[in-house]
Image (tube, rainbow, N blue to C red):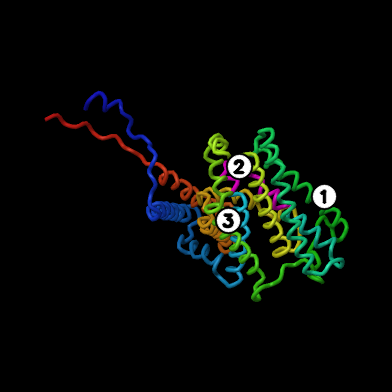
Amino acid sequence: MSKSTTQEPLFHISKRGALPWYAAWGIRGIALLAALVLCSLITVLVTGENPFKVYVTIFEGSFGSPRRVWVLLQNIAILLCVSLAVTPAFRMRFWNIGGEGQMLVGGLATAACMICLAGVLPNWMVIVVMILASMAAGAIWGAIPAICKAKWNTNETLFTLMMNYVATQLVAFFIIIWEVPKGAGKIGIINQATEIGWLPVVGGQKYLLNVIIVAVICMAMYVYLNYSKHGYEIAVVGESERTARYVGIKVDRVIVRTMILSGALCGVAGMLLVGGTDHTLTTTITASRGFTAVMVSWLAKFNPIGMIFTSFLLVFLQRGAGEISTSFGLNQSFADILTGIILFFIIGSEFFISYKLNFRHGAKKEG
């Protein structure tokens, strides 16, 4: 073996070219199968349960009854809505970690309209006002860090993260003001008797309207990002701000405009939760979807259509984990461990889609 061969590392990593879509999904499928095998081994060793029964239980957690299917679709819709909201900013390389806060202020604006306008305006007008108010509140919450970034180059990650805490405290403040009964520390169901401000039930299904609204937003976002002038400007700014300025794009305007859009859509998600699903307001109503949306958007490569599948995967695993804990009497932590392993393998597969390992070849024999 030559000296040059012995000094060569065992393997090195290089960037892949663009893989066909079926090859990329094939890698993800292999990663998922490997994760399921590992989870089966851990299940048998730690709990002694039949792993196939565990997987059936995970499936039943989402598809075991018509109601569970509708709850699954509702959860997917809300998570997808937030993921779509933060994606334009992410494509621009503006790391909006403030989806939680933007959802909360959107929900707060919705609750304010439902409480303060009940009996003042007709129901249909209350719904119109609360939609506009939630979008405006979210847009303002998104515009504040965007303006500071554009004017003073502040760190958008820290800024949007801190805005989440401010939004949480605002919601907590108004919950105390609106609490029913006094001293309860919660609002309860808003307008339970009159249902003023409640989004209408479509087709006899409580969650169908939410699903339809998010489906329309998804299609609109796909067209906006891929076929509009604004989408092109977002992509150019994301690639290089210097290039964007060179071709005449006003970067500061694009940053502010895009974050207003992101915040407004997060506000819509908050409105769907308060006006369409829960009919109340709490500091935990978002259930950390603003942070989960970051993973959904990244796994889908900022593609709105791909986000449908990644949203489904995460919600499916979350609901399945809860069903495991209930059915087998296992600690919730064990279910979360299985979910974490599966997500780890799926996220790790993205490395092998983007990069490849090149192993050292043996030295050629001299003739």
Q: Nearer the viewer, mark 2 or mark 1?
A: 2
Discs 2, 1 touching: Cβ within 8 Å: no
SS label for mark 3 = helix
Left or right of 59? Residue 352 is left
At label 3, the amino acid type is: Met
Residue behind mark 1:
173
Which residues, given as a range, are shown in magenta? 88-105
Left or right of 170? Residue 308 is left
At label 2, the amino acid type is: Trp
SS label for mark 1 = helix
Pick out the residue farthest to the left. 367
Residue behind mark 2:
95
Q: Residue at x 56, y 62 (%)?
A: 328
- x, y percentage for residue 241? 56, 36
Residue behind mark 3:
221
Left or right of 154? Residue 194 is right
Q: Nearer the viewer, mark 3 or mark 1?
A: 3
Discs 2, 3 touching: Cβ within 8 Å: no
